């Protein structure tokens, strides 16, 4: 599991790769949160294109980042999800608070 | 019902084993020739049950997780058991968004197991542990030979 982070203006993009479960989510959370604290982006893009597995730990990861970034009025955009990942994500009701998109940006 | 195939294993509740256990179950299930979606459903549900043993049942300790997997006709049954803290109120625990673990958990593990599998049974006793039984019917696909 890995995450590649890039910043362009007010947009922070985290490109995730591999499998997201409780074991790997801890490290991902730390890396993304460090970058958020450093850059205070107004938009966080979470790119799931290279994620091939995710359980509810992934939902927790997105929800947690949403809570964090909305304190500074930032928004979250989730994209690049495969059908299987989208299926898990949809179950969460996250659609009402973050923008979910299967498309790749 | 006659059992066609079966395996059991005992694994320590270390988080690295989450991916190990779901991969083993998926590999075992592969003999039923499931679709990519069915395999993904099974992996996700098993991952939820195993993670619950690690995160909740053995919260401050390392314990054993007991896995039994059976195939009978086109039905896959996975039993995941722990000897951890147990669940006080199963109905409440299974409600979507209910969690006792704070901010980073969504409280959706049971919801995922319920919606991705064809059956789930939970037995638990405070102080002695929890058993989750997951069932999935694997679709029989036309044109695929199965022994
Ligand atoms: N094996 C178990 N032993 C003890 N308690 C459990 C066990 N499994 C689940 N629970 C209890 O049931 C609650 C709900 O479980 P569920 O998997 O639905 O959500 P979660 O684990 O809290 O969050 P998520 O799965 O979304 O990360 C847990 O918070 C915990 O209190
Ligand atoms: Mg859970």
Image (cartoon, coloured by chain):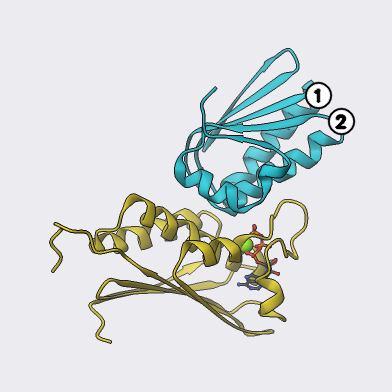
Element at label 1: loop
User: Looking at the image, is mark 1 or mark 2 nearer the viewer?
Assistant: 2
Q: Chain of mark 2?
A: A
Dot 2 alpha-carbon crowd within 10 angstroms: few under 14, some 14 to 19, many 20 or more: few
The residue located at (70%, 38%) in the rendering is A98
The residue that label 1 is drawn on is A40
Q: Which mark is residue A72?
A: 2
Q: Position of residue B15 (x, y in %)?
A: 56, 56
Q: Position of residue A73 (x, y in %)?
A: 85, 30
Q: Seen in the image, is B36 located left or right of residue B56?
A: left
Q: Quadrant of residue A36?
A: top right
Answer with the quadrant where ligand 1 appears in the image.
Answer: bottom right
User: In the shown orientation, is residue A70 left or right of residue B88?
Assistant: right
- Above/below status of B48 relative to B131: above
Display colour for chain A: cyan
The answer to whether the residue labelled 1 contacts the one labelled 2, judged by CB atoms less than 8 Å apart, is yes
Q: Quadrant of the C terminus of chain A?
A: top right
Residue drawn at point x = 41 percent, y = 53 percent? B40
The answer to whether residue B84 is seen in the rendering is yes
Q: Nearer the viewer, residue B50 or B16?
A: B50
- Above or below for B4 versus A96: below
């Amino acid at each position: 599991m890995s995450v590649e982070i890039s910043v362009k203006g007010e947009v922070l993009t985290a490109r995730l790769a591999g499998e997201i479960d409780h074991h790997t989510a801890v490290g991902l959370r730390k890396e993304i949160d460090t970058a958020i604290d450093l850059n205070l982006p107004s938009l966080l893009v979470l790119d799931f294109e290279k994620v091939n597995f995710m359980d509810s730990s992934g939902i927790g990861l997105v929800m947690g980042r949403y809570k964090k970034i909305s304190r500074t009025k930032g928004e979250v955009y989730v994209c690049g999800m495969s059908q299987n990942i989208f299926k898990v994500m949809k179950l969460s009701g996250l659609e009402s608070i973050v923008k979910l998109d299967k498309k790749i940006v | 019902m006659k059992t066609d195939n079966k395996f059991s294993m005992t694994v320590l509740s270390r988080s690295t084993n989450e991916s190990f256990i779901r991969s083993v179950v998926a590999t075992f299930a592969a003999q039923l020739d499931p679709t990519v979606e069915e395999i993904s459903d099974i992996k996700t549900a098993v991952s939820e049950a195993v993670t619950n043993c690690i995160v909740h049942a053995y919260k401050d300790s390392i314990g054993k997780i007991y896995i039994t997997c059976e195939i009978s006709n086109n039905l896959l049954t996975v039993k995941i058991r722990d000897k951890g803290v147990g669940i006080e109120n199963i109905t409440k625990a299974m409600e979507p968004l209910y969690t006792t673990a704070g901010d980073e958990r969504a409280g959706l593990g049971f919801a995922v197991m319920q919606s991705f599998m064809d059956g789930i049974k939970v037995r638990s006793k405070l102080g002695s542990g929890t058993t989750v039984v997951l069932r999935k019917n694997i679709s029989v696909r036309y044109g695929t030979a199965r022994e």
